[in-house]
Amino acid sequence: MILVTGGAGFIGGNFVLDWLAGSDEPVINLDALTYAGNLHTLDALKNDARHVFVHGDIGDTQLVSQLLKQYQPRAVVNFAAESHVDRSIHGPADFIQTNILGTFNLLESVRAYWNDLPEPEKSDFRFLHVSTDEVYGSLEKDDPPFAETHRYEPNSPYSASKAASDHLVRAWHHTYGLPVLTTNCSNNYGPYHFPEKLIPLVILNALAGKPLPIYGDGQQIRDWLYVRDHCSAIRRVLEAGRLGETYNVGGWNEKANLDVVKTICTLLDEMQPRADGQSYAEQITFVTDRAGHDRRYAIDARKLERELGWKPAETFESGIRKTVQWYLDNTEWTRNVTTGAYREWTTRQYGA
Ligand code: NAD
Ligand code: DAU
């Protein structure tokens, strides 16, 4: 079996669902259920014995060591993190705690377990760390996309904490020989995306008749990847990635934020038109920019394509249509996650 951390979050939840749709290998899912963790994402697995959910923290070495001893996983896939840049600006402490100290403690628990494994389990074991393109900093308009060799230049408390975790993972390989793999991915989107992030926030605000907040001039560029394509990349790296290597994952879909928001409005105009016949684009509102806002991210995913034969299945056009349709079809999931705590956050970030 495999141990997944953060499997009640957006990407981890999609990963667990896809894993068990394609394999009978069981999953232990360790998640602290922070505001971003939602067990409703895993409703389809409620009576599925292949999924064992454990409520707990990656930094709890006693718990993690006990889980490793009890379940003897052949791999750990680490999604658990604080993931929202805006929250890291308001309060970086949780990011240091989970992304740096949590990863450190997890690495130590895993190292002790791995050290005692007999062969061939020891050689076959893998620790896959899921990271982000934000560790590479920001690109100018005409710069080439980030390759794995790009220097680390994190600019936000979030990306700095992820960069630190990547360095720890790298060091645990070089110093202790822990068999690690790291993936650095661009912006994901798709089902079960928590609506504090741009794409789900815009879909839900549009439908609720609220403003669609665009930071600054809206010309910041992100490279969008459909979440299930990210999951297939992780499965491929886990299966065949070279030990100690980093693989960049991206969708070759560079888009300016304003264009992404306009695309969502056009899709909603077609799929669920406003009662007054106006376009949802009427709700677009320019707001104060994010502090230290990175201008452009873009991923060069050729290493993953060349070495492991991975390619994304979705274009941005097909993926964003599926995503908008998913939010229209899954209003109950949305109702369940937009609790009082969510409303407190949006009031703090965007005003009343
Ligand atoms: P998310 O915020 O939706 O989910 C994070 C999950 O981790 C939640 O379920 C939360 O409860 C859990 N968690 C948080 N702290 C924990 C702790 N101390 N112990 C155990 N569980 C804990 O995040 P996401 O968007 O699914 O991102 C998953 C991973 O992928 C993160 O490491 C993130 O940095 C990385 N990543 C995200 C994106 C993206 O676009 N969302 C892109 C590249 C990389
Ligand atoms: O690049 C990968 C990263 O993508 C991940 O590592 C992060 O975990 C993930 O949250 C995401 O970070 P971003 O900051 O790029 O995502 P977010 O959805 O918050 O914002 C996307 C862009 O949209 C960004 O340029 C900021 C802008 N934005 C965001 C929000 C929430 C707005 O203009 N208005 C908004 O209200």
Image (tube, rainbow, N blue to C red):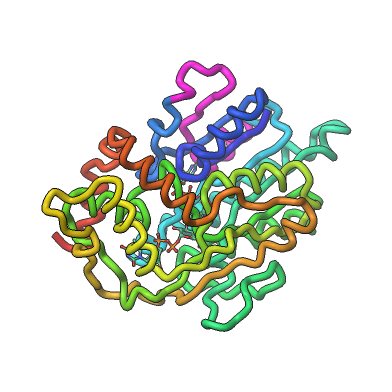
> Measured from the top left, where is residue 256 in percent x and y?
42, 71
Vertical order, 270 against 38 (above or below): below
Q: Quadrant of the C terminus?
A: bottom left
Find residue 217 and report its image quarter: bottom left
Residue extending farthest to the left is 276
> Measured from the top left, where is residue 75 in percent x and y?
70, 37
Q: Quadrant of the N terminus?
A: top right
Region of the chain picked out in magenta, as a range: 44-66
* Residue shown at the point (20%, 62%) measured from the top left: 283
* Residue shown at the point (82%, 33%) measured from the top left: 121
Nearer-the-camera pick, 84 or 221: 221
> Measured from the top left, where is residue 181 in percent x and y?
72, 51
The answer to whether residue 91 of the structure is visible from this angle is no
Residue 51, magenta (yes or no): yes
* Residue shown at the point (33%, 50%) measured from the top left: 195
* Residue shown at the point (67%, 62%) measured from the top left: 301
Q: Is residue 244 left or right of residue 314?
A: right
Vertical order, 171 against 75 (above or below): below
Q: Is residue 322 left or right of residue 308?
A: left
The answer to whether residue 166 of the structure is visible from this angle is yes
Residue 278, magenta (yes or no): no
Find residue 168 and report its image quarter: bottom right
